[in-house]
Amino acid sequence: MKKTSFFVLLLAVLLLVAACGKADAPTPTPFPATAVPPAPNTAVPQPTQPPPTDVPTEEPAATDTAVTPTDIPEQPDKFNGWPAPAKTYDPLSRTPVSAAERAALAALIAQYPPDRDDTALALAYKGLAAPPEINPDLVTEPLPVGTRENLNILKYDVNTVSSPEFVLEFVSDHAYFWFDTSPGNVEPVQADLERAGAAFDEIYERNTAVFGQENNPGIDGDPRIHIVNASPINLCDVSLANAQACGLGGYFGSSDILPQSVDDQSNEREMFIMNGALFGSEAYIDILSHEFRHMIESAYDANDWDWEVEGSAMLAEDLNGFSGDPISRGNRFLASPDQQLNRWVDGDTTPYYGQGYVINRYIYNRLGPELYKVFATHPDEGFTALDDIAANNDVDFSGGMDLWLDWLAALAIHNAEGAPEKYALRDGLGTALARSIKEYPATVEADVNQFAADYYKLAGDGEVTINFTGSNHAQLLPVLPTSGEHMWLANRANYSNVRLTRAVDLSDVDSATLTYDVFRDIEQGYDFAYVSVSTDGGQTWQPLVGEAMDGDVFEDNPSGSALAERFYTGRGRDWTQEIIDLTPYAGQEIQLRFEYVTDPILTFGGIAFDNIAIPEINYYDDAETDTGWTAEGFVRATGYVPQEWFVQLIIFEDGAPVVMRVAVATDNTAVIQTTGSSENPPILIIAAAAPMTLRPSAYQLDFQ
């Protein structure tokens, strides 16, 4: 059968396996969207600062204006070639930021990617004639025990789908418990079923009180949730002989709440999948609390950042009395705190779960249960939701960035004697590992990830002056625009649909060719980019086929979740020139679209286009100016954007920590004067923040 995608929010791996798997993807960036960092808090003491230094004078920032497909400048009579590539910067760039780079930064912040709409995509690409009506009858009598159904289950490590038979074994107040009849699954006993049912009913009440209500009664009209316990041989690429090697605990598949007319592999019910081999264990109940949190989140914000999605699910474990795993993962993160907050990885995810847990635990402590529920149910992502909460409630922080900086300090001092209450985390968590500087003078040349921090203990006794120099630039991708300063870049976000569209008039030509340069850094088999044409005003879209496109090997689309036979997916190393024949559309007025569709978790760098041309109509776009495109999540970006730096100093007065935010000059330098101590050393925190990018930034510290 045709294998369509399972878009999932999490594959929680507990017990022996510390990493998270994916079921068509288990949520990096959005970039915590705060355009301007908060001013230093004058209510707390500031370290001694030197007189202001002269900084380079910069031209005013350019302002991009909205462009419609009809605002097309005249093309030159003769194409004179693409402009030369822009210059590159040294890692510790001291070159002043340009107006174009500032404009690109502003655009990345303003152009947050649109949410993915699976119904709209089915209408556009799958031949769906009209949006389906979802109006199920309310189920008042539960399904009878003994009911049998075949359900679609994702084998997460190879991203393929099967449909084993399940039997309904137990019904609780809030859930059905289904069990796979395949070999390798447990045969549940009544006592364990009753314990699991009672435990989940308690989790249901607690999770809905903290995180909000799931869609209820939902797509099937049934107020009960379906807990589907699958055999390890259907969840993982294992045999009966090594079924215990399946490290998947469970996952929530968001495609199951879609109509089958939109996704033909939907199970059309509110459900999550569990590893049935774990049934009867304490870990099984723990995973129930985690996966139910994911189900709840899908009702409010399907494309939040990975740290919120996975971290709040770890918080659900903690609040339901299963604190061991969240604390253990949190301490893995604290042992190496230079870890980008707004990213996820395809590898060892343990410290990323831990980081997400620690910041969600901090937000929960700081907001309290009532406002945390506002945060958990907020339609905006991450820091933007915190900005709104700060603006509309009596809280002691100004927004998401302000709270993030407090959290960075809390990682160092939350368990210190005399630490203010606003830095509290929880018992069992350690502190961020810091590098000790024991002798002066000393020089440190280092880099730090975006939305992450390095920590230093000033353990040498005596007065010390610290000169900080940070790079002025953050590179957005591993590559720079192929020509000029700009490229069309898809902003990065989970469960998003980014589009770049324009009208193209081919009515006066008999043949046409589309050429462009493309760079892709996309999660293979889960996220996809397309180039397509519409001849009916944008109601439906026909995918185009390029010579350099993917889709010709099974690994590109193992679950069949792509919307076309050919597309872009996977991770490229450089720009590729693409050629597409548009002759079938000659003699017509069409719309041309570049489109990028992501799943609910884990995004890499994304996709970028440059040097777009249709020579037969004398159309050449080097992205240096707007030429009639409608951009929805795409940004006309420079290769670099301004790098923001944040420096904090923690000193100890009478043994109690005092946190000071250091003013960083516009040329990204700062001077800090303090007194080092081998007994109670001050702590220096260096943090960087630039949107979109997954690349670290360089800095230098001179200790005198």
Image: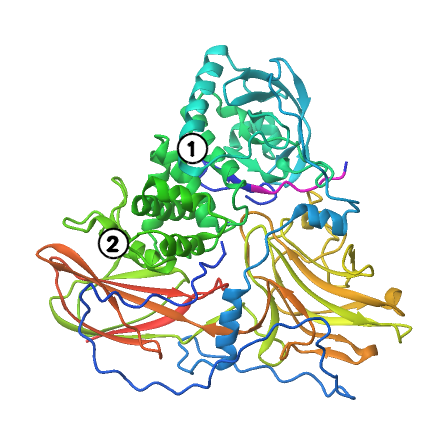
Tell me, yes or no, whether the highlighted magenta stretch contains residue 3: yes
- For mark 2, what is the residue? 412
> In which quadrant of the rendered image does the N terminus lie?
top right
Q: Main secondary structure of the magenta part?
A: loop
The residue depicted at 77 percent of the width and 65 percent of the height is 591
Expressed as whole percent of the image width and height from the top left, the position of residue 77 reads 78, 88
Q: Report which quarter residue 396 is drawn in.
A: bottom left
- For mark 1, what is the residue? 207
> In which quadrant of the rendered image does the C terminus lie?
bottom left
Q: Secondary structure at mark 2?
A: helix
Amino acid beneath label 2: Ala
| Numbered badge on residue 85 | none
- Picture layout, residue 589 above or below residue 50: above
As measured in the structure, the alpha-carbon distance from the residue carrying label 2 to the one carrying label 1 is 30 Å
Name the outermost residue toward the right.
Answer: 510
Expressed as whole percent of the image width and height from the top left, the position of residue 683 reads 21, 61
Q: Which residues are magenta?
A: 2-8
Expressed as whole percent of the image width and height from the top left, the position of residue 680 reads 13, 57
Q: In this view of the protein, which residue sits in the foreground, 552 or 594?
A: 594
Amino acid beneath label 1: Asn
The residue depicted at 40 percent of the width and 36 percent of the height is 210
Label 1 packing within 10 angstroms: few (<14), some (14-19), many (20+): many
Side (left or right) of 381 relative to 158:
left
